[in-house]
């Protein structure tokens, strides 16, 4: 029987890199996102690169608890359980706090926090990881420190880190064999990074090239992290040798944070 890893936010840059890496590690991959066209494209890309792998996609808005329950029930009907759950679905959002709209705040919290919670709660409630496994939440260094003009995003990522630590301890105590950890990337070169640079360029009254330079100046190694570097951390946590690692928040950030 195949061992399966489910990756939410699979159409994004980090999600794609994680799915590719776990496919390379021998997992069947379940790609989850809310945009059908992008999902099909991602599935095609992975199957083209790993023609012998068991890869399929499932459309789901993780911020909708009913859709999440339906997704897991569909997997049960297919007699599929999970070895790895990667909660990677996430969006950015921020601005001057006094000017942040209800929609911006709720969209960030619903996607980043509630989506992680719904996916994890239903996994446990429906016993979709019966033989132990790994729950890996893609948070951020913004989940450990404040980022100016990023209060919704930082609040959501702090919540992800706290949830990971609390649940990791809970599941360690009940001998489930399931570990829970957060991975905290710094600035990663993705489409989201491009949008964030535009956002900061607008706030700072400069262009995107200068915004990128200012960001890189903050990172001790002087560059953005690549998605493959985040995927490598996920691969380690998902591996058998990491069974003693739980309730942790592990940075992949080029020295941006050392906490």
Image: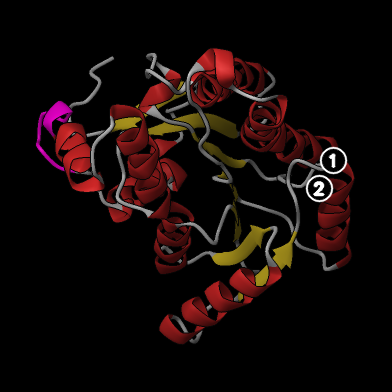
- Residue identifier under label 2: 68
**Image position of 110 with respect to 238: above or below:** above
Q: Is residue 13 left or right of residue 159?
A: left
Locate residue 117 relative to residue 198 in the image: left or right. right
Give x and y (percent) for residue 10.
55, 59
The answer to which image quadrant residue 43 occupies is bottom right
User: Going by the image, does 47 lie left or right of 163?
Assistant: left
Q: Which residue is mark 1?
A: 65
Q: Are marks 2 and 1 in contact (CB under 8 Å)?
A: yes
Residue range corresponding to the magenta coloring: 217-223
SS class, disc 1? helix
Q: Position of residue 162 (x, y in %)?
A: 55, 16
Quarter the C terminus occupies: top left
Q: Say which element carries label 2.
A: helix
162 in the magenta segment: no
In this orientation, which residue lies closer to the viewer: 227 or 96?
96
Which image quarter: residue 101? top right
Near mark 1 (Cα within 10 A), the count class, few <14, some 14-19 or many ≥20, is some
Image quarter for residue 33? bottom right
Q: Position of residue 138 (x, y in %)?
A: 49, 38
Residue at 47%, 32% (x, y): give it. 139
């Amino acid at each position: 029987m195949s061992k399966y890893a489910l990756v939410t936010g699979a159409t994004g840059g980090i999600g794609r890199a994680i799915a590719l890496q776990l496919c390379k590690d021998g997992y069947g991959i379940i790609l989850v996102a809310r945009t059908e066209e992008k999902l099909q494209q991602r599935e095609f890309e992975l199957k083209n690169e790993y023609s012998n792998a068991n890869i399929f996609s499932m459309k789901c808005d993780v911020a909708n608890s009913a859709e999440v329950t339906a997704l897991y029930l569909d997997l049960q009907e297919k007699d599929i359980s999970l070895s790895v759950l990667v909660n990677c679905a996430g969006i950015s959002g921020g601005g001057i706090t006094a000017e942040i709209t209800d929609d911006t705040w709720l969209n960030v919290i619903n996607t980043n926090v509630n989506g992680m919670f719904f996916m994890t709660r239903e996994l446990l409630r429906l016993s979709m990881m019966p033989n132990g496994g790994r729950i890996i939440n893609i948070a951020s260094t913004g989940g450990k420190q404040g980022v100016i003009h990023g209060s919704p995003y930082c609040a959501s990522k702090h919540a992800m880190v706290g949830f990971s630590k609390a649940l990791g301890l809970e599941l360690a105590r009940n001998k489930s064999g399931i570990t829970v950890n957060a991975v905290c990337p710094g600035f990663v070169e993705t489409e989201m990074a491009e949008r964030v640079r535009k956002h900061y360029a607008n706030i700072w009254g400069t262009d995107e090239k200068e915004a990128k330079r200012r960001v890189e100046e903050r990172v001790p190694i002087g560059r953005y992290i690549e998605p493959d570097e985040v995927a490598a951390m996920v691969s380690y946590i998902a591996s058998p040798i990491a069974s003693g690692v739980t309730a942790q928040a592990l940075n992949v950030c080029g020295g941006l944070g050392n906490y």
